[in-house]
């Protein structure tokens, strides 16, 4: 029984590792400028965690195999080095592992959160609400008109609560249901929620950030690959949570210019 | 040394049925009541998870009779999105609060802590009785939300504001459902506070003669540490729930932001903060997951030692590690909030203690492995589950390395990776701890043995099945599969659906194994083999030196006196390979605690 | 055995015929009453209705691939007729109206059909979905009226749900999964009608007497007109709205 158990543990450990090693369900491709830092960090961690996982499962299996059928005269043996050795090993191995991961990881985190967007980053506002995202581009004047929550009327396509008659800045604002961005251009995303908590997650872009009701949150990133991706909500926001998404279209500058002109005409 | 243990609260054995089995102040009866409650809750939670899994794997399948469970949730047996979320919320809440907190901590702790410390009973037996009935009331209040208003809340077991604070306009169950949820949890907190108080006092003040703190078995230490955590954690959650209820019934605005708009209408509220709820919740929530697992660490150590026929490499290191886990658990809670919008500097600040907490966890695992080396391991249902626990704890623990790092968390937060992580390390591991404890202590609790063959079948199916369910969760998460989705309609999620189908089948298989366990439990309780003696596993701690099942005041007319460390196995020169704590035999062992 | 079957058939036939006769005789009774007909027009050109970007849900955008969807605040016919205007009798004191057809509020291609559903207080109506994507139906009555709000999903394949409203009110209804989806439940007392694409309407079953007819439009507001209905005849009332 114990021997079968030991073999089972080893088989499970190996079977668990196969999909990872074979990249059967890989992380979505990276289309951001900062993503490689996260991916490197992830790969390093996978090595360390994966090896710790395999080593400890194998050790467990081996000990179960070895010590489960003692002969009548067998004496209890103590692990060489005893508890002291193990504690020191834990501190050295895991301590340095943690320290290394923690310290190197700061770089990836800082690349997203501790750098300011460059001055010519393109501002786009995103509003999350049950259960859709809407986007606003400032238009030719480059400024966003103020928001009036009491003027929000989804029934009349006024998703942001703009007052286009009285606010001159709002007149040329462009509101869209899809997010299009030019490739290789830094985007400065201004995020706010209309109602409850939501989150902005684009796996390919390596960004995930919660919306905080009552607080403006910002994010900045640069996409490097033309294509169509999905923006999904990852913060439970109600019954339509699973269906809260929008498309992100990364376009060439020309395509983007044409797209924004077309959207402006639709306002 | 405290010698005040004798007759702290003397009470005679009750005679009426009600005082004996219902409103009993006997810690052993209360422990069994807690166990029964946990069993009932676990069965409900498991059935909910089957329905969820069936829906996720085979969404188009109409589950016959589903409409009976809820008025509006599943008309024509077609599951609505809100109903999935309601089941999920109830599954999570029931499992975390009413299974993982009650079974390893309140059930086994109640039954065995006083016995292992050598006490007649808990110091406040009436509080103890209240603790169970209050907890039971909390359970009824939670379940009642299935049958009232628009059903139970759909906000998840974390119940993030403002979704949980704005009322029915936010979704079905978000009005009365949330109020009942919060009321249930607040009541639950009272029950656990009363319990923790008793546990702490029992450990500190009720020990019998000769029982120094270091002579307490590891289980007693685990319960003691857990109850200290419980005292602080539940004391924060309760007021948080009360504030949430006030937002619903008294028009306050603790968690309601200004200018929230739903259906083109501005909702009342001003300046309430969603981050406030998250801080309050996770300040409780993280210690809570340790409340769920630390008793498991104790039980597994206890069971393993008895079956390895040797003490752990170091008793003290294990105790200090559990203490360090408890202490650190208050400093890491922010790792649930890396991308929540709190200051990104705090994310880093929370990340380091989170990485540091892997050190005591690793020490615990290494001590187990090191102690296994050179032991004389006995294989039975209890030790299999204890060893399975170690395997699960390792598997669930390594994924913590990823989630502890804010940069990687950007990718993995709120995905199935997290679901896989916490199910393995907290859910399955803790359940294995409960199973190990059950197979191990069943003879002491009931006077009968559990069926070993069924126990082993249960183990094999559970061990393989649980890996088949929860390992693939990690792969899904790495591929970006968001959690708390009732269907996978996004283009990039559709290729993952076959994995979901596999998991569903594994979940049904594993669930079936649990029915075998329930059968074994009930059958053995009434018709099982009678325990051959008071100490069938040849253990050393005090529960094995008293009668089976123990008498009303635990030790009959002779209170025990302790002469030895808790785990004197295979001591050189001793007459048997185990020396009980109450044995008067002189040992040559010089390292004994005083 | 055979005979029994025959007997059953005959019996049910008798019952059916009886029922039919009863229903018909009610119709005959109603013939003594008058009706109000007319047309609702929009003054000037119809306001431009924005197109709807349904890209968030590919099911919806596919359904409208060849025929782009537009908001339906103003739906005006070629001759200037204004649709979706609800006409009813102000201060109706008569009995509740027997419903002549089952009212259906359908979710089709991620739009509401009809955009405005008029009904009597207490009259039951069906909400159904013809779509292969989930919707939630979330009407927002004023809590002071006594109407109770609800919010419930209909995933594909869900059976219709039957509902009714207690008090008179114009209740906006929305789908939060598809924020552009909006419509109205116009709950009135007494006989009512909704104008069609050409602005035409007929309020049936109006007993002879003097009435104030009210015309309500979700954006253009309300107008009233006094009419006199004679037994068995049709009175006429025409309205002209200005777009706001
Ligand atoms: C029969 C075995 C189990 C199965 C098949 C199962 C399955 C699931 C599934 C499918 C979810 C929902 C994931 C999602 O939609 O995001 C879930 C959530 C959860 N489960 Fe389990 N589960 C099982 C046992 C347990 C146990 C023993 C625990 C105890 C800790 C537990 C605790 C939770 C919690 C806390 C959640 C999160 C609920 C939320 O997101 O609010 N589960 N489980
Ligand atoms: Cu959302
Ligand atoms: Cu919809």
Image (cartoon, coloured by chain):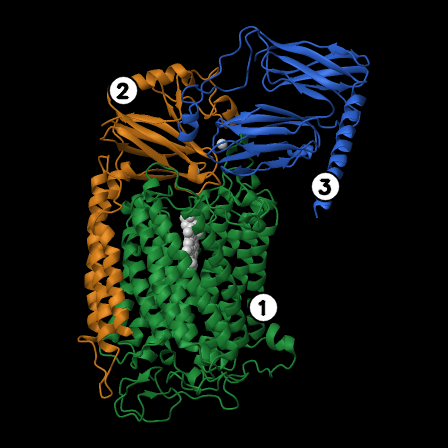
**Marking on residue C6:** 3
Residue extending furthest toward the front: C2
Q: Secondary structure at mark 1?
A: helix
The residue that label 2 is drawn on is A255
Q: Secondary structure at mark 2?
A: helix
Q: Left or right: B57 with respect to A92?
A: right
Number of marks present in the image shown: 3
Q: CA distance from mark 3 to mark 2?
A: 75 Å
Q: Which chain is blue?
A: C
**Marking on residue B130:** 1
Q: Which chain is orange?
A: A
Q: Are marks 1 and 2 in contact (CB under 8 Å)?
A: no
Q: What colour do you see for chain B?
A: green
Of residues C146 and B424, the one nearer the viewer is B424
Q: Left or right: C128 with respect to A24?
A: right
Q: Is residue B454 above or below residue C83?
A: below
Residue extending furthest toward the left: A80
**Residue C29 position in % (x across, y down):** 81, 22
Mark 3 or 2, closer to the camera = 3
Q: Residue at x 34, y 36 (%)?
A: B491
Q: CA distance from mark 1 to mark 2?
A: 70 Å
Q: Residue at x 52, y 88 (%)?
A: B556
**Residue A250 position in % (x across, y down):** 28, 27
């Amino acid at each position: 029984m114990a021997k079968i158990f030991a073999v089972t543990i080893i088989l499970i450990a190996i079977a668990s590792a196969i999909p990872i090693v074979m990249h059967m369900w890989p992380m979505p491709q990276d289309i951001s400028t900062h993503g490689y830092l996260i991916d490197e960090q992830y790969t390093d961690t996978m090595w360390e965690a994966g090896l710790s996982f395999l080593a400890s499962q194998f050790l467990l299996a081996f000990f179960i195999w070895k010590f489960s059928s003692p002969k009548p005269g067998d004496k209890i043996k103590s692990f060489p080095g005893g508890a002291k050795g193990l504690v020191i090993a834990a501190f050295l191995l895991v301590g340095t592992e943690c320290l290394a991961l923690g310290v190197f990881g700061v770089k990836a985190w800082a690349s997203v959160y501790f750098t300011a967007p460059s001055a010519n980053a393109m501002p786009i506002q995103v509003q999350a609400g049950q259960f859709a995202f809407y986007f606003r581009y400032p238009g030719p004047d480059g400024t966003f008109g103020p928001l009036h929550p009491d003027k929000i009327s989804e029934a009349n396509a006024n998703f942001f609560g703009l007052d286009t008659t009285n606010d001159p800045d709002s007149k040329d604002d462009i509101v869209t249901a899809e997010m299009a961005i030019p490739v290789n251009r830094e985007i400065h995303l201004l995020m706010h929620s209309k109602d409850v908590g939501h989150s902005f997650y684009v796996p390919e872009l390596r960004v995930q950030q919660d919306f905080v009701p009552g607080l403006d949150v910002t994010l900045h990133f640069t996409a490097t690959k033309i294509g169509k991706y999905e923006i999904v909500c990852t913060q439970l926001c109600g019954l339509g949570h699973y269906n809260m998404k929008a498309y992100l279209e990364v376009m060439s500058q020309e395509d983007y210019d044409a797209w924004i002109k077309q959207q402006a005409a639709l306002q | 040394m405290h010698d005040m243990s004798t007759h702290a609260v003397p009470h005679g054995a009750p005679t009426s049925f009600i005082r004996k089995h219902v409103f009993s102040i006997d810690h052993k009866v209360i422990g069994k009541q807690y166990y029964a409650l946990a069993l009932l809750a676990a069965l409900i939670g498991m059935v909910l998870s089957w329905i969820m899994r069936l829906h996720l794997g085979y969404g188009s399948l109409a589950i016959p009779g589903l409409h009976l469970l809820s008025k509006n949730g599943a008309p024509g047996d077609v599951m609505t999105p809100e109903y999935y979320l309601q089941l999920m919320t109830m599954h999570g809440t029931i499992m975390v609060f009413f299974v993982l907190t009650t079974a390893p901590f309140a059930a086994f702790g109640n039954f065995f802590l006083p016995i292992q410390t050598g006490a007649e009973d808990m110091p406040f037996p009436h509080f103890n009785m209240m603790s169970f009935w209050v907890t039971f009331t909390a359970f009824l209040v939670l379940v009642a939300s299935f049958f009232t208003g628009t059903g139970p809340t759909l906000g998840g077991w974390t119940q993030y504001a403002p979704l949980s604070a704005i009322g029915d306009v936010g979704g079905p169950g978000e009005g009365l459902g949330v109020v009942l949820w919060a009321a249930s949890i607040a009541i639950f907190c009272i029950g656990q506070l009363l319990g923790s108080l008793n546990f702490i006092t029992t450990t500190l003040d009720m020990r019998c003669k000769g029982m120094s703190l270091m002579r307490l078995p590891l289980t007693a230490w685990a319960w003691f540490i857990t109850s200290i955590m419980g005292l602080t954690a539940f004391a924060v959650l309760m007021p948080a729930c009360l504030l949430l209820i006030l937002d619903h019934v008294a028009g306050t605005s603790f968690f309601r932001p200004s200018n929230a708009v739903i259906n083109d209408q501005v909702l009342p509220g001003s300046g309430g903060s969603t981050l406030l709820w998250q801080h309050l919740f996770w300040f409780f929530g993280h210690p809570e997951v340790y409340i769920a697992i630390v008793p498991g660490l104790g039980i597994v150590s206890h069971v393993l030692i008895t079956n390895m026929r040797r003490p752990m490499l170091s008793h003290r290191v294990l105790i200090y590690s559990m203490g360090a886990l408890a202490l650190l658990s208050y400093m890491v809670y922010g790792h649930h909030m890396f991308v929540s919008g709190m200051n990104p500097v705090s994310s880093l600040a929370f990340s380091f203690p989170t990485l540091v907490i892997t050190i005591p966890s690793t020490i615990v695992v290494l001590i187990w492995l090191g102690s296994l080396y050179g032991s004389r391991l006995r294989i039975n249902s209890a030790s299999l589950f204890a060893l399975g626990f170690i395997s699960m704890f390792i598997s669930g623990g390594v994924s913590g390395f990823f989630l502890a790092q804010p940069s990687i968390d950007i990718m993995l937060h709120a995905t199935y990776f997290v679901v896989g992580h916490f199910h393995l390390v907290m859910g399955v591991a803790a359940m294995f701890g409960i199973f190990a404890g059950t197979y191990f202590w069943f003879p002491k609790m009931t006077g009968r043995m559990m069926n070993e063959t069924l126990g082993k079948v249960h183990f094999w199916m559970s061990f393989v099945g649980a890996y088949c369910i929860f390992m693939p969760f990690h792969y899904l998460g790495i591929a970006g599969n968001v959690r708390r989705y009732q269907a996978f309609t996004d283009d990039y999620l559709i290729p993952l659906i076959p994995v979901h189908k596999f998991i569903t089948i594994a979940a049904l298989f594993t669930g079936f194994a649990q029915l075998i366990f329930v059968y074994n439990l009930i059958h053995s309780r009434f018709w099982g083999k009678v325990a051959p003696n008071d100490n069938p596993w040849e253990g050393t701690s005090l529960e094995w030196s008293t009668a089976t099942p123990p008498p009303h005041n635990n030790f009959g007319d002779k209170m025990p006196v302790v002469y030895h460390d808790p785990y004197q196995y295979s001591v050189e020169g001793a007459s048997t390979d185990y020396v009980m704590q109450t044995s008067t035999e002189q040992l040559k062992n010089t390292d004994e605690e005083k | 055995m055979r005979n029994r079957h025959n007997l059953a058939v005959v019996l049910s036939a008798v019952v059916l015929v009886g029922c039919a006769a009863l229903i018909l005789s009610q119709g005959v009774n109603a013939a003594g009453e008058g009706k109000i007909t007319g047309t609702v027009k929009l003054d000037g050109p119809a306001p431009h209705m924005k197109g709807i970007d349904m890209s968030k849900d590919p099911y919806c955008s596919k359904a409208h691939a060849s025929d782009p969807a537009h908001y339906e605040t103003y739906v005006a016919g070629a001759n200037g007729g204004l649709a979706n205007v609800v006409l009813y009798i102000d201060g109706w004191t008569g009995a509740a109206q027997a419903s002549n057809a089952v009212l259906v509020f359908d979710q089709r291609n991620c739009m509401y059909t009809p955009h405005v559903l008029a009904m009597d207080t207490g009259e039951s109506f069906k909400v159904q979905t013809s779509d292969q994507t989930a919707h939630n139906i979330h009407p927002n009555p004023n809590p002071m009226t006594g109407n109770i709000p609800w919010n419930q999903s209909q995933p594909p394949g869900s059976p219709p749900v039957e509902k009714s409203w207690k008090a008179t009110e114009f209740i906006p209804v929305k789908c939060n999964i598809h924020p552009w989806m909006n419509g109205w439940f116009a709950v009135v007392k007494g006989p009512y009608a909704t104008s069609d694409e050409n602005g035409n309407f007929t309020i049936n079953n109006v007993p002879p007497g003097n009435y104030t007819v009210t015309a309500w439009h979700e954006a253009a507001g309300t107008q009233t007109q006094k009419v006199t209905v004679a037994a068995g005849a049709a009175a006429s009332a025409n309205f002209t709205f200005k777009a706001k």
